[in-house]
Amino acid sequence: MPPSLAHKLQSHIQLIERLKRILPITKIVVEVASFDTQKMVNPEISGIEYQRGELMGYEVREYLLEKWGRKCAYCGKKDVPLEIEHIIPKSRGGSDRVSNLTLSCHECNQKKGNRTAEEFLILRYRRRRKSH
């Protein structure tokens, strides 16, 4: 068995042994599955498009600059330093997939904090309506 699989198996066994000391476990079922996330997003993808993936020929930052028009996704500022930022924060279950990344200026990134992009934009909208 490859070392990586042996380690994974041993980690599972150790976790189960710890749980057995605390809980009255009588049965354990381990489900092992892998998911093709590219096919989940686009079930029709195939051939060379599938092999190349979404970022073929791009560095992540350059891809995001092009995708978001080289401006802050929240305030629209251009010609300012832009930071790569999570649409759904990792602390709230967001991933590092490029589909969960955007660009923001430092000010918006700091103000957004641990909110999702949707929550942040709603908050900004409400604040603007109150000030007018």
Image (tube, helix red, strand yellow):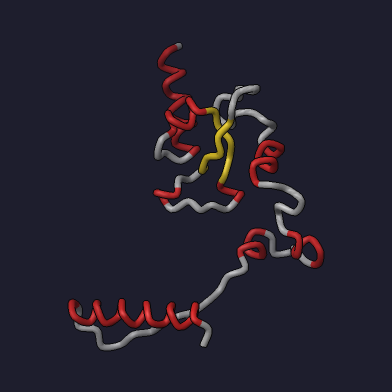
Residue 70: image location, x then y, percent:
67, 30
Q: Is residue 25 left or right of residue 51?
A: left
Quick one: quadrant of the C terminus? Answer: top left
Q: Nearer the viewer, residue 3 or 19?
A: 3
Number of disc labels: 0
Instruction: Identify the residue at image location x=49%, y=38%.
Output: 118
Instruction: Identify the residue at image location x=60%, y=23%.
Output: 80
Residue 74: image location, x then y, percent:
55, 29
Residue 66: image location, x then y, percent:
71, 37
The single residue placed furthest to the right in the displayed view is 48
For residue 122, above or below residue 129: below
Q: Is residue 18 left or right of residue 117?
A: left
Q: Quadrant of residue 112?
A: top left
Q: Nearer the viewer, residue 59 or 63?
A: 59
Instruction: Identify the residue at image location x=69%, y=43%.
Output: 63
Residue 26: image location, x then y, percent:
25, 88
The single residue placed furthest to the top in the displayed view is 132
Instruction: Identify the residue at image location x=24%, y=78%.
Output: 18
For residue 122, above or below residue 24: above
For residue 63, above or below residue 32: above
Q: Quadrant of residue 68?
A: top right
Q: Is residue 73 left or right of residue 23?
A: right
For residue 47, above or below residue 74: below
